[in-house]
Image (tube, rainbow, N blue to C red):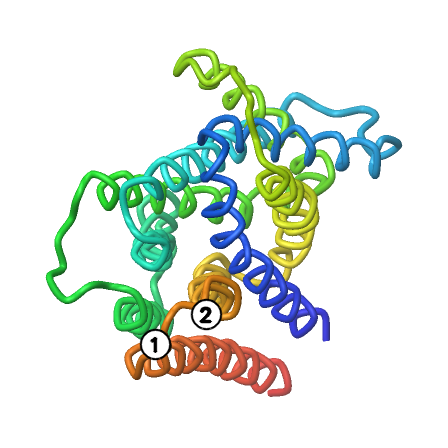
Amino acid sequence: MKKHLAVAGLIAVTIIWGGGFVASDIALESLRPFQIMTIRFLLASILMGAASIRDLKGMCLEEIRAGMLMGTALFVGFAFQIVGLQYTTPSKNAFLTALNVVMVPFIAFVILKKKIGMKSIGGAVMAIAGVGLLSLEKNLTLGIGDALTLICAAGFAFQIFFTSEFVKKYRAVVLNFVQMLTAVALSVVSLFLFGETDFCATAKGWLSVLYLGVISTALCYLLQTASQRYVDETKAAIILSMESVFGTLFSILILHEQITLRMICGCMIILAAVIVSNLADVQAESACEDKQGM
């Protein structure tokens, strides 16, 4: 039951993150990349700290180091994603970000020597194919925005991997708080480094950043960390890749993008990939129960 609730939690995260692509695109109309990141992570840090202040007592050095690793990976992911979004389309940005799906199991293999199941690989390949069909342009070119987004995908892949590993050893509230503090610290440094200290946002810009900070960051990362206690990193990455599906849907509804057959087919393939991943877990659990029964 807990695993099913965890999967549902991750799907909820992807829906909110899908809206984040639209919110980021709107925010970039009046705010610079590191201004957006500083505000969203500052809001998330304050909210997470206030919500779990009692649980933050007695933080150990190991928890802080783990949270800092997660926060650094998170910063890299968001920094290169939002900077890349200035030079590429939201749909292409979403596809290239989703490449973390295929990166995660190989990170686990290299670092932990963890075996990669064929169904997990199949699900990951299907997810990438679906997101590619959904978002990638016909010429398949890689501009500066696409190259930056590839680095973003690697950052998110490590964040997912670190989360899966550390949440089993340390307190989720501490990990999330330190993760957000690390991300906001790096964002502030970048804010001054790139000369983005003059804020001049519109009402839509402030509302978009408010959504990104409170809903898409604070709420989602608490939910993601809690859910990944019961879902392995490869399966989590495949489920989280569905954010591109919801990102496209929100773009259609809010930004009035045109619906095409490719979009529909891409969504269906990604959903099939998630089902394949879930079936692989169900079969593994059944086999384990059969052995125990014997």
Q: Nearest the camera: 128 or 286?
A: 128
Left or right, residue 10 beside residue 146 = right
Labels 1 and 2 touching (C-beta < 8 A): yes
The numbered mark at residue 29 is: none
Q: Residue at x 17, y 44 (%)?
A: 143
Give the x, y percent position of residue 25.
45, 47
Q: Residues within 10 Å of mark 2 (few under 14, many from 20)?
A: some
Secondary structure state at the residue bearing disc 2: helix
Give the x, y percent position of residue 248.
43, 67
Above-or-below relation of 261 to 238: below
Residue type highlighted by circle 2: Ile
The numbered mark at residue 263 is: 1
Q: Nearest the camera: 52 or 30?
A: 30
Instruction: Classify the position of the N terminus by image quarter.
Output: bottom right
Q: Residue at x 52, y 26 (%)?
A: 35
The numbered mark at residue 252 is: 2
